[in-house]
Image (cartoon, grey):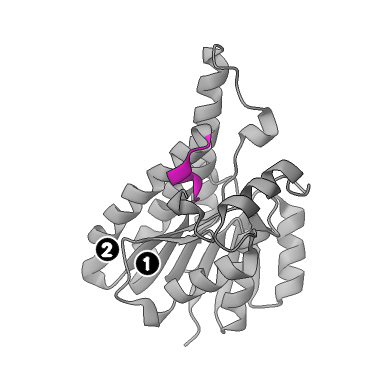
Amino acid sequence: MARNAVVTGGGTGIGRAVAARLVAAGDRVALLGRRKDKLAEAVDELGPAATAVPVDATDPAAVRDAAAELPERIDVLVNAAGANTDLTHGAPAADDLDAVRASWVANFEANVVSAVLVTHALLPRLADHARIVNLGSVTARSGQGSYGAVKAALEPWTSELAFQLGPRGITANVVSPGPTEGTDFFHGGDFPPARRAFVEERSANGRLGRVEEVAALIEFLASPQASHITGQVVHVSGGMFLGR
């Protein structure tokens, strides 16, 4: 029987790559995201097993409206939406408290509130033995201002979900990528040369990751074969999380 999957941030990058793998495996996938054009492109590429549900996942009313368009039974939920909002608005000056607050709130909403709202909206629909995968970041261990801190917040929340839902056979895990090629992290731009050089120096294999590598792990954790893996943080960062 085909499963019903929901992927937030499904219009681009890792979310889109995950949706592609799930569709190829025979699942029906609802792609959630803010940008209608990107969602439409993804659905055109993925075919009739994919549907687009535009939503601002930080807005409770919008999430409630979007939930009405989703299946009554959810087998897989992948919270891949998120971004380092400082890359859009600029990192705040340390002595500008208003800007510091805005930075932290914006990153918390984009990366944590979005995942929490969608998950809570869909909790009543999660099938027994469903799978939840939240997208973290290597910066939760290495730091990157408010972005790294809020990504770290996903980890204890996910472990709480694992124990809350475990009696029903539902698993919840975090996949934490390092810097990854093929995402829209820099809003359509390439990795800055200095950042690329830093990653190549600090990773064990001397390169950035690729979206398909992250998506392959998420597909596995979303599969029936991963039934005894829960509450975990699994890194796809070429060893960068080790901090060596």
Q: Look at the image and say whether residue 122 sits in the magenta stretch.
A: no
Q: Is residue 166 above or below residue 114?
A: below
For the residue pair 91 and 81, the one nearer the viewer reads as 91
Contact between labelled residues 2 and 1, with CB atoms less than 8 Å apart: yes
Tell me if mark 1 has few (under 14), some (14-19) or many (20+) residues whose alpha carbon lies within 10 angstroms of its own: many
Question: Can you see residue 221?
Answer: yes
Seen as rendered, the residue at the extreme left is 167
Give me the residue at 41% from left, 44% from top: 152
Q: Is residue 146 above or below residue 72?
A: above
Seen as rendered, the residue at the extreme bottom is 1
Find disc 2 in the rendering and name its residue.
Answer: 165
Is 79 on the left-hand or right-hand side of 193? left
Kind of residue indicated by mark 1: Leu
Q: Is residue 217 above or below residue 69?
A: below
The quadrant holding residue 99 is top right
Q: Is residue 49 above or below residue 87?
A: below
Of discs 1 and 2, which sits in the foreground? 2
Give me the residue at 77% from left, 55% from top: 37
Instruction: Identify the mark nearer the N-term, 1 or 2.
Output: 1
The quadrant holding residue 48 is bottom right
Is 51 on the left-hand or right-hand side of 5? right
Seen as rendered, the residue at the extreme top is 95
Tell me if mark 2 has few (under 14), some (14-19) or many (20+) residues whose alpha carbon lies within 10 angstroms of its own: some
Q: Which mark is residue 126?
A: 1
Q: Which residues are magenta?
A: 137-144
The CA span between labels 1 and 2 is: 10 Å
Q: Position of residue 25 (x, y in %)?
A: 56, 83
